[in-house]
């Protein structure tokens, strides 16, 4: 039994069949047929954002929280181009996002029609795949392919561009998940994304041998641990061997921070003992990470004495930056499941003591004691550690990465690879909708917050209970810090004025608080935590605080700047 | 020509797929010498040949990136020494009357052929390895070269068969 539907209705049905329950979007001319059909499908909740960039970030946040593709919708032209930063963010951090854009009618394409842009061309380098749907008959299959490609293997964003007249075209609904299921089994038409199941290889034996014989081994856990959900396997590997665990920015919350084997974050703002451990190690077990330059510093000076066991899904990452002694290609969890039976119990007591001796206490003072640590402890305490933290980009991001004590898997969400300011507030909306009932804090600086603060209106209209924290220091703090260290303290364009955030909150009809001293901290954060709807808390932090330690850009992990006194790199 | 690598790619013969493949090469900043595309024995499939001046590891990384791309059916890299390469050039060349015989000697020397002889000059076709074609071009520059069109190099590996690797 078939029935005739419009392209828009077919699109909605196909989305429902993919398990979509929420869309973030903004209507406009070329996507109107889709919005006309949408009310017929109450299973698809539409969240009207205030800017399409926020739709892409919210879909990204939803995807990071669930592991399922988040969906954003925009019209042609400016609507589509506004998605670009969000898609690039998802692409760099391998998040499954499906973006649907309206396009001008086929007969108008290529004629510089009103609100026409070549969004396929624009997004080609920042999507895993993109496709112009040229006929209504393609829609069902294209949607299935899009979700398959976005979620399969190394995830990423996929864009579907649908001309307005195709949305109105009629076709038979073939329906049934059977087609989609078959696609999933066979890998569909998408040649490059099939992942063979992990097979035991000689490389596994070699990896086990290296793990058994190394004197100073380390585990570096990246985003792949979170994406594959390899939490238990990582925990077993660490416990069985006593090998200390380093978590990269996107690997954070892949391993409990209270665990005695957890060392911290490596790289540009990694603690001295973490980076020193890397430099001294003789074996690095890299789990689902790509050895980004913010992790390695100067590659020539990175972990020169260490062999690398690189566990990575994407073969093009193996040896890209750091040569691998053993490459285990596959999903991190699958590889660890195959590897663990070959790993014999061992200990690393002497090495652990050696790393502990690298730890150096650092004296830092903050105005009125309102330190990032105190603020983050208060936020953690207010939910007994049971909240998800979505951070923005900058100094606060590094504090949130290093100082918050993550206990639950995937409870830290941030824009890592692209470093997108303005990410936290809209992404947190997606996280909050994906995790109803759980506290979600969007932590931003005063710079990043002002990039997407229009989304408070979305939260109010849609009842999305995000708790927004602003670390206000009156500066674009991380850029100011670089100016202090490397540009002779010339604070060019980094002082930034803010509105009265408490009144701003009031204008949106939500609760707003300002914390200026340490004695206000606990009470205000507790109030904010108890607030059922969206709430905003501004923390007036030390204006010129720095994130220490810091590896100068291009420097080696062995050359950290550890404090104000040690700034010999200042140049005029 | 030393250190030259050929990357051979079988892809769907759609402009968007070619666009993607070439876009990837640009984005990854790969050292490309030439690109050539044309149909294959399989309907709906094109072969894109990318000549790279690089080590084999760089060419193999390009292959890994290309293989991830939707629309790419198979890709392979091999040193040009492990295959056969050919390029074709069309050269419009003029010579004064008293040097015409000399020009014809050069054309004969390179096994080239004259495709057109008009008042504007001769159109000469020459094919061979990139080095051979370049050598011929240099020889023709002793006369007045008006215009040159080169096909870019195509290559087939002697010890591999890309089309048989599809779908494996």
Image (spheres, coloured by chain):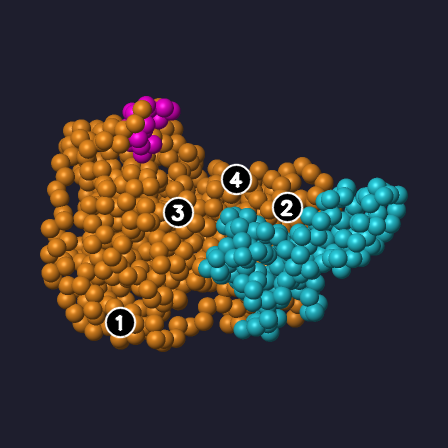
Chain colours: A orange, B cyan
Q: Which residues are magenta?
A: A477-495
Q: Position of residue A433 (x, y in %)?
A: 39, 50
Residue position for label 3:
A417
Q: What is the chain letter for disc 1?
A: A
Kindly identify which chain the residue marked by label 4 belongs to.
Answer: A
- Mark 3–mark 1 Cα distance, whole angstroms, equals 31 Å
Residue pointed to by mark 2: A103
Q: Is residue B54 left or right of residue B110?
A: left
Question: In which quadrant is the N terminus of chain A drawn?
Answer: bottom right
Eyeballing the image, is A280 above or below B75?
above
Along the polypeptide, which appears first: circle 3 or circle 1? Answer: 1
The answer to whether marks 4 and 2 sit on the same chain is: yes
Does A224 appear in magenta?
no
> In this image, A154 relative to B114: left or right?
left
User: Between disc 4 and disc 1, whose residue precedes?
Assistant: 4
The Cα–Cα distance between marks 4 and 2, rounded to whole angstroms, is: 14 Å
Mark identifier at residue A208: 1
Q: From where the camera sits, is residue B145 visible?
A: yes
At mark 1, the secondary structure is helix
Badge 3: residue crowd in 10 Å (few <14, some 14–19, many ≥20):
some
Tell me the CA gap for discs 3 and 2.
29 Å
For the point 68% across and 54% down, the residue is B133
Camera-nearest label, 3 or 4: 3
Q: Say which label, 4 or 2, has the lower sequence index.
A: 4
Task: Decide which of B80, A410 is in the foreground and name it.
Answer: B80
């Amino acid at each position: 039994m078939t029935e005739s539907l419009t392209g828009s209705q077919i699109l909605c049905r196909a989305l429902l069949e993919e398990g979509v329950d929420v869309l973030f979007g903004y209507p406009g001319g070329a996507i109107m047929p889709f919005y006309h059909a949408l009310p017929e499908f109450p299973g698809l909740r539409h969240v009207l954002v205030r800017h399409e960039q926020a739709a892409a970030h919210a879909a990204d946040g939803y995807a990071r929280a669930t592991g399922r593709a988040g969906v954003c919708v925009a019209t042609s032209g400016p609507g589509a181009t506004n998605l670009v930063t969000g898609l690039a963010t998802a692409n760099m951090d391998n998040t499954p996002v499906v973006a649907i854009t309206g396009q001008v009618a086929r007969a108008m394409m290529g004629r510089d029609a009103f609100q026409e842009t070549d969004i396929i061309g624009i997004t080609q380098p920042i999507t895993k795949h993109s496709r112009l749907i040229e006929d209504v008959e393609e829609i069902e299959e294209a949607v299935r392919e899009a979700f398959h490609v976005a979620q399969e293997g190394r995830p990423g964003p996929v864009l579907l561009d649908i001309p307005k007249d195709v949305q109105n075209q009629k076709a038979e609904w073939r329906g049934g998940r059977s087609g989609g299921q078959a696609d999933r089994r066979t890998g569909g038409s998408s040649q490059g994304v099939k992942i063979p199941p992990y097979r035991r290889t000689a490389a596994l034996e070699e990896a086990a041998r290296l793990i058994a014989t190394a004197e100073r081994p380390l585990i570096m856990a990246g985003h792949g641990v979170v994406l594959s959900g390899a939490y238990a396997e990582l925990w077993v590997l660490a416990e069985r061997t006593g090998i200390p665990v380093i978590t990269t920015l996107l690997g954070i919350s892949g391993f409990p921070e209270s665990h005695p084997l957890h060392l911290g974050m490596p790289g540009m703002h990694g603690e001295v003992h973490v980076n020193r451990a890397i430099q001294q190690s003789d074996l690095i077990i890299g789990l689902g990470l790509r050895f980004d330059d913010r992790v390695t510093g100067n590659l020539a000076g990175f972990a020169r004495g260490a062999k690398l066991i690189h566990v990575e899904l994407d073969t093009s990452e193996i040896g890209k930056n750091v040569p691998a002694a053993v490459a285990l290609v596959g999903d991190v969890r699958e590889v660890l499941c195959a590897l663990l039976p070959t790993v014999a119990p061992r200990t690393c007591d002497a090495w652990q003591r050696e790393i502990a001796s690298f730890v150096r206490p650092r004296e830092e003072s903050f105005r009125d004691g309102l330190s990032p640590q105190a603020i983050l402890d208060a936020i953690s305490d207010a939910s007994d550690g049971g909240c998800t933290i979505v951070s923005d980009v900058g100094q606060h991001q590094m504090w949130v990465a290093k100082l918050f004590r993550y206990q639950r898997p995937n409870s830290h969400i941030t824009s890592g690879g692209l470093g997108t300011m303005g990410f936290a507030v809209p992404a947190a909306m997606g996280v909050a909708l994906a995790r109803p009932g759980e506290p979600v804090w969007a932590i931003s600086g005063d710079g990043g917050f002002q990039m997407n603060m229009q989304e408070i209106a979305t939260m109010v209209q849609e009842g999305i209970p995000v708790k927004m924290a602003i670390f206000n220091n009156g500066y674009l703090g991380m850029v100011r810090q670089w100016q202090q260290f490397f540009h002779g303290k010339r604070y060019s364009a980094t002082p930034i004025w803010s509105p009265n955030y408490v009144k701003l909150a009031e204008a949106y009809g939500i609760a707003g608080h300002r914390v200026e001293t340490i004695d206000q901290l606990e009470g205000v954060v507790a109030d904010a935590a108890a607030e059922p709807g969206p709430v905003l808390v501004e923390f007036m932090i030390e204006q010129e605080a720095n994130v220490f330690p810091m590896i100068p850009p291009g420097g080696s992990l062995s050359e950290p700047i550890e404090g104000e006194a040690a700034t010999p790199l200042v140049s005029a | 020509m030393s250190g030259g690598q050929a990357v051979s790619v079988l892809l769907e013969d759609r402009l968007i797929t070619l666009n993607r493949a070439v876009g990837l090469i640009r984005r990854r900043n790969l050292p490309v010498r030439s690109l050539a595309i044309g149909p294959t024995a399989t309907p709906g499939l094109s072969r894109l040949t990318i000549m790279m001046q690089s080590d084999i590891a760089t060419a193999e990384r390009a292959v890994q990136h290309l293989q991830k791309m939707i629309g790419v059916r198979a890709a392979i890299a091999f040193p040009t020494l492990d295959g056969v390469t050919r390029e074709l050039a069309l050269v419009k060349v003029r010579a004064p009357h008293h040097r015409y015989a000399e020009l014809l000697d050069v054309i004969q020397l390179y096994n080239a052929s004259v495709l057109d002889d008009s008042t504007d000059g001769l159109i000469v076709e020459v094919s061979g390895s990139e080095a051979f074609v370049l050598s011929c071009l240099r020889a023709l520059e002793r006369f007045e070269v008006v215009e040159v069109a080169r096909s870019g190099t195509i290559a087939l590996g002697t010890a591999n068969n890309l089309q048989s690797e599809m779908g494996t």
